Image (cartoon, rainbow, N blue to C red):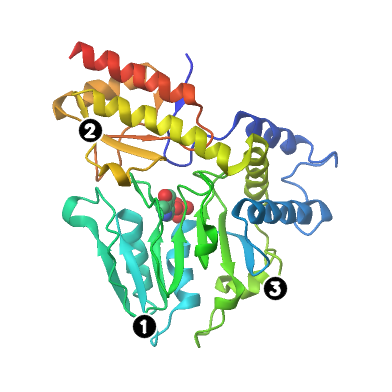
Amino acid sequence: MQLHNFNSGPSILPQEVLEKAAAAIHNFNNTGLSILEIGHRTSHFVEVVKEAQTIVKRLMDIGDDYEVLFLQGGATMQFMQVPMNLLDENGLAAICDNGVWGNKAVKEASLFGPVKVVSDTADKKHTYINKALDIPSNATYLHITTNNTVEGTQWHSYPQTSALLVGDMSSDIFCRPTNFKAFDLMYAGAQKNMGAAGVTMVVVKKEILGKTNRKIPAILDYRKHIEAGSLLNTPPVFSIYVSLLTLRWIEAQGGLAAMEKLNLAKSNLLYNTIDSLSAFHCPIAKEDRSIMNAVFFLTDASKEEAFLALCKTEGMIGVKGYRTVGGIRVSMYNALPYSSVEAFCNLMKSFAEKI
Ligand SMILES: *Cc1c(COP(=O)(O)O)cnc(C)c1O
């Protein structure tokens, strides 16, 4: 049976990336050694990091005022590393709490300085994005989660602010052309849209660092990682290599414009199907729907179990909603083919006809 991988993360990767990664485990770059066996300071691996940084800058259309780092600790570590590097008692972090991940960013930032939640969409179970933000004029930075992986909402244009703009882009990085220059710091765990688990990409504008008087341990100090060319200590070599393969794949497909075309085709098909069937409903405000993660429900909740059982027998992987949200979540990251969404929509239609 053909499987369709809608996992929310770690998630589907391009077949070609998996094949090249597998080959590199046996023989990396004709060195006769596995990628798992080479030193991280060899020219072979230094080139991997450099090429990955170059492609990221090209895709983002950003210049040398930004640095690209490949760090560990997941996006979750960025919830504390960002405020540790940018915030102190004299500053203020303005944060949008639009769901599970934004909420964690709020909690962690509070350990490092004053925080103001400038948007809390819990009143409507995070089914929309509040764009009318009241950002205090003394805010050091505004933090947004560009795509709310769990709740199924996405910022389709970014808020204007005189504060620094920080984006958690873990689940929609490189899904379409974006004004990356609007951001001063961006981060993304690789395991959703750009690679394997174990590495987190951080893109930061150099000039914003070193403004707090806090003492920062070297391993958590972005400046130390920048000085060391993202090789401060042994980095997650294999995960970085899988990210490089995925970045190359994105460019070979035609870059971010090609990603957007595919992602819009998939998400339009899915949302149109949901909206056309009375057996399903999507509570997310239309203008805020995510093109990466669609969250929706069976109109008759008692039918959910039967639908999920059918998905299982038909090879639809990872479509059960997040534990606190319930319902169905279909993740449609870059590597997911259009045909998988088509197959899923056909299944929804045949299920709706039978109930
Ligand atoms: C998955 C996710 C995280 C957490 O990532 P980890 O790598 O598990 O720490 C944070 N933010 C967003 C938006 C996510 O989707």
Residue 188 visible to an observer of this rendering: yes
Q: Position of residue 319 (x, y in %)?
A: 35, 31
Dot 1 surroundings within 10 Å: few (below 14), some, or many (20 or more)?
few
Dot 3 surroundings within 10 Å: few (below 14), some, or many (20 or more)?
few
Which amino acid does the dot numbered 2 rest on? Phe
Tell me which residue sits at (57%, 62%) in the image.
203
Q: CA distance from mark 1 to mark 2?
A: 41 Å
Of the residues tagged 2 and 3, which is closer to the observer? 2
Left or right of 32 in this view: 282: left
Q: Position of residue 52 (x, y in %)?
A: 69, 52
Q: What is the quadrant of residue 144 in the picture? A: bottom left
Q: Secondary structure at mark 3?
A: helix
Left or right of 259 in this view: 117: left
Q: CA distance from mark 3 to mark 1?
A: 30 Å
User: Who comes first in sequence, dot 3 or dot 1?
Assistant: 1
Tell me which residue sits at (45%, 68%) in the image.
165
Q: Position of residue 345 (x, y in %)?
A: 35, 21
Which amino acid does the dot numbered 3 rest on? Glu
Residue at label 1?
138
Query: Is the C terminus in the top left, top right, bottom left or bottom right quadrant?
Result: top left
Q: Secondary structure at mark 1?
A: loop
Q: CA distance from mark 2 to mark 3?
A: 49 Å
Q: Secondary structure at mark 2?
A: strand
Q: Position of residue 178 (x, y in %)?
A: 51, 52
Residue at label 2?
297
Residue at label 3?
227
Of the residues tagged 3 and 1, which is closer to the observer? 1
Residue 4 versus residue 61 in the image, above or below: above
Which amino acid does the dot numbered 1 rest on? Asn
